[in-house]
Image (cartoon, rainbow, N blue to C red):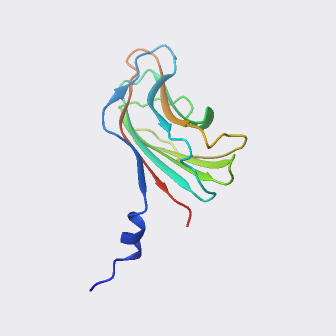
């Protein structure tokens, strides 16, 4: 009988935390920050130091050259990624990836990356250690969009997250 590869064995241990399939767009064009996807993570999701949550979001930007558009990610109310105000001359697409590593019963380390097309921009990579959390309670991971100007529109088109238990 053939042995399952390490990858096949390990993938069975992953827990899909959320899978977002519906498009959600910003509703303001005046610089107001709108939630795109907001996911409440279950209490005790991070049961052990070394547990890691991976999340990946895909966003699209309107093809209007005048507004600026900003994307942010938050975990447990803490800003973990900020794209800054960007202008997409002919529209664009971005990927936001967030990795949350549990380091203790009250602390995590968050690495986030923003990569966009339709604009000249190096990927934005951030590292944010967060302490003083209550990981035995629920915590929220969310992505927001802030268009500022007529025609500005940011749409979250998909998002997925999975938990990898500590080895």
Residue that appears at 51% across and 51% down: 53
Name the image quarter holding the C terminus: bottom right
Q: Residue 67 location, x and y as percent? A: 45, 21
Percent coordinates x, y for residue 89 in the rendering = 40, 30
- Res 62 seen here: no
Q: Quadrant of residue 18?
A: top left
Is residue 21 among the parts visible in the rendering?
Answer: yes
Of 50 and 137, the residue lying toward us: 137
- Against 154, residue 130 (above or below) is below
Report the residue at 65% width, 48% height from top.
108
Query: How many tags in the picture?
Result: 0
Relative depth, front residue between 126 and 39: 39
- Could you tell me which residue is drawn at 50 percent across and 31 percent down? 86
Left or right for 40, reference 48? left
- Going by the image, does 47 lie left or right of 2? right
- Give the left or right position of residue 76, taking residue 4 as reference: right
């Amino acid at each position: 009988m053939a042995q399952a590869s390490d990858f096949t064995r390990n993938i069975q241990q992953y827990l899909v935390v959320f899978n977002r399939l519906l498009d959600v767009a910003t509703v303001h064009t005046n610089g107001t920050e709108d939630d795109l996807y907001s996911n409440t993570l279950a209490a005790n999701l991070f049961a052990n130091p070394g547990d890691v949550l991976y999340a990946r979001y895909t966003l699209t930007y309107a093809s209007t050259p005048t507004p600026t558009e900003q994307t942010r990610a938050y975990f447990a109310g803490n800003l973990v990624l900020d794209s800054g105000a960007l202008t997409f001359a002919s529209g664009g697409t971005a990927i936001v990836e967030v990795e949350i590593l549990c380091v203790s019963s009250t602390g995590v380390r968050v690495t986030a990356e923003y990569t966009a097309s339709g604009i000249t921009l190096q990927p934005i990579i951030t590292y944010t250690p967060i302490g003083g959390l209550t990981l035995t309670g629920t915590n929220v991971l969310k992505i927001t969009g802030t268009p500022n100007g007529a025609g500005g529109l940011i749409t979250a088109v998909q998002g997925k997250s999975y938990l990898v238990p500590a080895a």
